[in-house]
Amino acid sequence: MEKNTIINNEHLENEKKTSSKENNCAVTNVFKVIGGKWKVLLINAIYSNCPKRFGELRREMEEVTQATLTTQLRELERDGIICRKAYAESPPRVEYKLTDLGKTLMPVIRSLEDWWHAYTNCRDIHNE
Amino acid sequence: MEKNTIINNEHLENEKKTSSKENNCAVTNVFKVIGGKWKVLLINAIYSNCPKRFGELRREMEEVTQATLTTQLRELERDGIICRKAYAESPPRVEYKLTDLGKTLMPVIRSLEDWWHAYTNCRDIHNE
DNA sequence: CAGTATCCATTCGGATACTG
DNA sequence: CAGTATCCGAATGGATACTG
């Protein structure tokens, strides 16, 4: 696995020590990694056309401000889901890729998508 | 499917109209249903011992305040994941069960749990 | 081009007190 | 027993302006 996959997520490890109101649910921890408002959309976008430049993501997701986009990307990088590669050119170019670890998320994301479609379907039938 | 499964989730349907900064990602919608801080824990607790009384949930989850517990349960009920049955006794008794729709969540939850375990495992190896 | 910095609005959940 | 009502603090993400 590539070097960039090394992960710094003390924010996940420290939670037992720092706060008494944390639950230790695995799923809750997953939500901390991919639960950000735009993260799954970003993961799907990067996965479907990899590597992906910052500007491409920005154009595809017009509703997201640049600052928010950067924050979400940085967190995904910190958690080892994507890696960021900056080229020392002018104008600058930055590319984002899914890490091997990030790719393991895809089946999970698909199962969540499938469940949502079954859910809305069931809901529609019941409410006419 | 049981009658109580009828779902009132206008909060999910209206989002396209009300806000311009919403994304239409299926996974994001799932998070709205089960992303609450204690929801997966509640779903697991109710699933593993069904039906479950309010007081049992409270005792098993000491870190959650009563008010928060009620809110999370109400939202799960509104979204058709659990159903609530109050018995007109004294002292009052209330039982919570997973709906059929709620039960379809279990494989999804398991896949999220599995991913988390693989993730932490991979992380531990990489960071020594 | 790909960011940072700063400030601000909203949302979520916790604390506490009261009740049919 | 199983709630409700009210208030409040922390965290999240959006708006806007500036930059190497």
Image: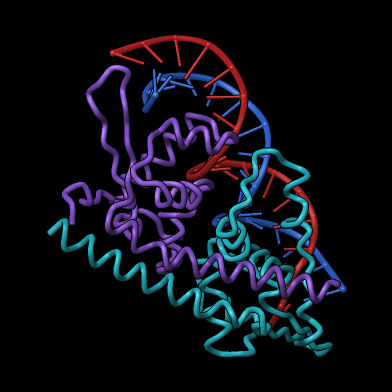
Chain colours: A purple, B cyan, C blue, D red
Residue B50 percent coordinates (x, y): 60, 90
A114 lies above or below A53: below
A72 lies above or below B118: above
Residue A104 as seen in the image, left or right of residue B19: left
Residue B116 as seen in the image, left or right of residue B128: right
Which corner quadrant of the image does residue A61 belong to? top right
Which corner quadrant of the image does residue B95 belong to? bottom right
**Image quadrant containing the C terminus of chain B:** bottom left
Q: Nearer the viewer, residue B65 or B6?
A: B6
**Image quadrant containing the N terminus of chain B:** bottom right
x 39%, y 62%: residue: A105
Given the current orientation, which residue lies at the most extreme left position?
B128
Q: Nearer the viewer, residue D3 or A1?
A: A1
Residue A123 as seen in the image, left or right of residue A68: right
Q: How many marks?
A: 0
Residue C15 percent coordinates (x, y): 57, 55
x 40%, y 67%: residue: A24
B103 lies above or below A104: below
x 16%, y 49%: residue: A3
B45 lies above or below B37: below
Residue A48 percent coordinates (x, y): 43, 51
x 40%, y 33%: residue: A54
